Amino acid sequence: MKNISNIPAIDISHLTVSYGDNLILSDCSVTIPQGVMLGIIGPNGAGKTTFIKSILGIIKKKSGQIIFLDRAFGHVQHKIAYVAQRNTVDWDFPLTVFDMVLMGCYGKLGWFRRPGVSEQIQVREALVSVGLDEYANQPIGVLSGGQQQRAFIARALVQDPDIYFLDEPFAGVDAPTEKIIIELFKKLRDQGKTIIVVHHDILTASAYFDWALLLNKKVIACGPIENVLTQPYFNQMYGENFRSNIFHKMSL
């Protein structure tokens, strides 16, 4: 059961990002409460991945302030997990699935303290939760695309963060994997965790998320899903020619 304070998970003020003269994100301000599952939705090239990476300091911002749990990132980074797109990993590297997931513990332990029995138990539990326990001792190269994504998420689970950022975790995965992932996210949300997901399929957004952030170079809208997934906001984001029948499909 949720026990959430009134402190926002993330408070973003006037975030602006540019590459040279190319403006990627313009004056983005948004407040995200704790304990929600939020989908970041927008067209290709809208700046969704840049939005996440600039919040986390992976990409340098031009201006703006980011506050996590009422503190600066450096004070709470151990409470934040980031799951990048899986093509960022060399899946041919000689590493077992267990050892890959175990790497998620190092943020808490530091690189000079060896994981102990407690951490190994956490890894086993994380692998069970994503349905990969039987692959623990297999090389990561044997995993399918969906299994790779689940291994990525298991690595985030062992960090035991309060806030999860995930960049298109459903892209290219099979239906069983998508179901496993979304059910896991909802359990985490119900425990009070904040889940922030870059999402590409607007047809599933209302079923998957309780909050949405519509983004196209700037914040179009952010709030409870029923208030945000509306025709006027989508017209602002995609243009006036956006197909209105998409909302009928979303309600089916």
Image: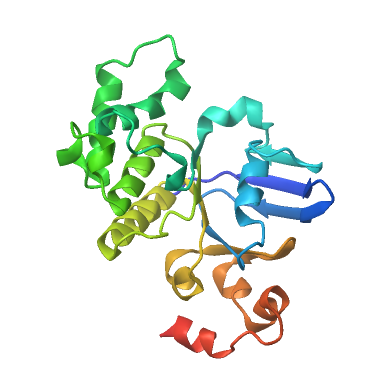
Residue 208 screen position, x and y as percent = 43, 65
User: Residue lying furthest left in this view?
Assistant: 134
Residue 206 percent coordinates (x, y): 48, 72
> Would residue 196 be seen by someone viewing this image from the given angle?
yes
- Find residue 10 and report its image quarter: top right
Q: Residue at x 29, y 62 (%)?
A: 174
The one of 143 and 244 positioned closer to us in this rendering? 143
Picture coordinates of residue 64, whole percent (x, y):
80, 43
What residue is shown at x 54% (from left), y 58% (from top)?
38
Q: Nearer the viewer, residue 76 or 96?
A: 96
Spot occupied by residue 39 in the image (x, y as percentages of width and height): 53, 60
Examine the rendering and report whether any part of residue 8 can be seen. no
Most extreme residue toward the right is: 21
User: Is 31 left, or right, of 169 in this rendering?
Assistant: right
Total of numbered circles in the picture?
Answer: 0
Give me the residue at 48% from left, 69% from top: 201
Furthest-front residue in view?
92
